[in-house]
Amino acid sequence: MSDANEVKLCLKVMLNKQKSKVLFAEIDSNFADVLLSFLTLPLGKIVTILKKHYGEKARVKFGSLTTLYNGLANLQSNHFWTEGCKDMLLNPRSSFEADCRKLKLDIGDTQPTRFFRCADTDCKKKRSNVTMYYGNIECDCGKLLSKPMGITTHEDEDEDEDEDDGGVFTEKKISFQLTDDLKMAPSIQGSVTQTLIRLGVEVTQGAEFMTVTLGFNEIIELLKASLFSETPLTDVVLRQTNTMGCSTVDSLHHKKLGSPSISKKTMTVKAVVQKSTNKLLFVQAEEDFVDFLFSLLTIPLGGVEYLLDSNTSLYEHRQFVHKYNRTDKQ
């Protein structure tokens, strides 16, 4: 994987006559893989990516998740079972890390996974107690799990990606049509029009193509725009300002779930409500509810869409994961 700041991704976009909107784009498998990698990012990881890129003082807020993440970071370690518990929540890992390291551009800066065991060579549980987090998790014997093990999920990669016939998440030689709201479909050979009809794109008279090159900064902007905007491609390609400043998820309408949960598990909290406005001020909760809230940071973006059965307005590239992945295999 190349230095992220040096990588450039090219796409062809068709603009309307007024050059004020992206109608659709033609992208290759490298670009498609980068977009798909957004779905693998845990929510807490997205918070850290945005904070790292835009800075602590930037007015980019991922809904209440940023508040939740900051509250977690500010809690003293003695409120957790171990220091490692807090570290794991602040730096959630993805099960797709090995795949993301193969991307042409990995915005998550994924590092090879390493495992650590007990530093005491005489410990009887040195083979059973293992962690991916260095230096802050204790073994049952009381020593730190800090001794590197000779295994990783990722051997040193000598493979030449250019010689690999396969892509990361998509087939390497397949191209895709991408709409402004990030619906994606594999291009049908000899019939671009048919693909656009399936995507609901209407090409108006006077529209024209433009080749665009996006680097690391623009891909981060696309991640942010995909969370906060209904026209992320236009926002990034044409540098429009509706998502470039103060951003919150609240700008999008919320959808109601179609059916109630069938789970019988419940958690009880004590809520304090202001009588005059009926506004919730705060709640008192036990550790089960707090654990639940913090665990939200570990859920990948695509997992949110799955758990809510696509009833969310967090981002606009949700539909093709199921629909067009099936189409590609037909």
Image: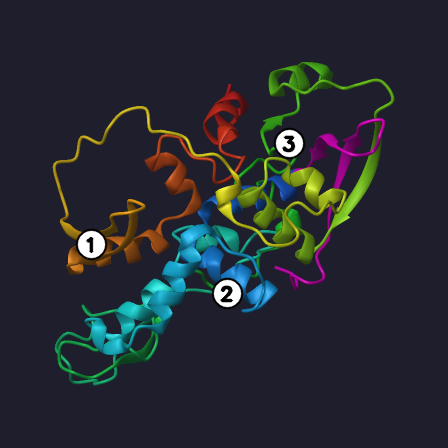
Q: Residue at x 46, y 63 (%)?
A: 155
Choose the circle earlier in sequence order: 2 or 3: 2
Q: Residue at x 47, y 58 (%)?
A: 47
Where does the image place residue 297, in percent across and percent down from the top left? 36, 55
Q: Which residue is mark 3?
A: 174
Question: In this rendering, would 194 be left or right of 112?
Answer: right
Choose the circle earlier in sequence order: 2 or 1: 2
Around disc 3, counting alpha carbons within 10 Å, would you say few (fewer than 14), some (14 to 19), or many (20 or more)? Answer: some
Residue 163, compared with residue 2, is above or below; it is above
Dividing the picture into quadrants, the one containing residue 93 is bottom left
Choose the circle earlier in sequence order: 3 or 1: 3
Toward the right, the furthest residue is: 206
Q: Amino acid at mark 2?
A: Asp
Label 3, label 1: how far apart the Cα atoms are: 45 Å
Dividing the picture into quadrants, the one containing residue 56 is bottom right
Stretch of the chain drawn in magenta: 1-28
Q: Amino acid at mark 3?
A: Ile
> Considering depth in this image, is 190 or 277 the residue closer to the camera?
277
Where does the image place residue 190, in percent across and percent down from the top left? 74, 16
Around disc 1, counting alpha carbons within 10 Å, would you say few (fewer than 14), some (14 to 19), or many (20 or more)? Answer: some
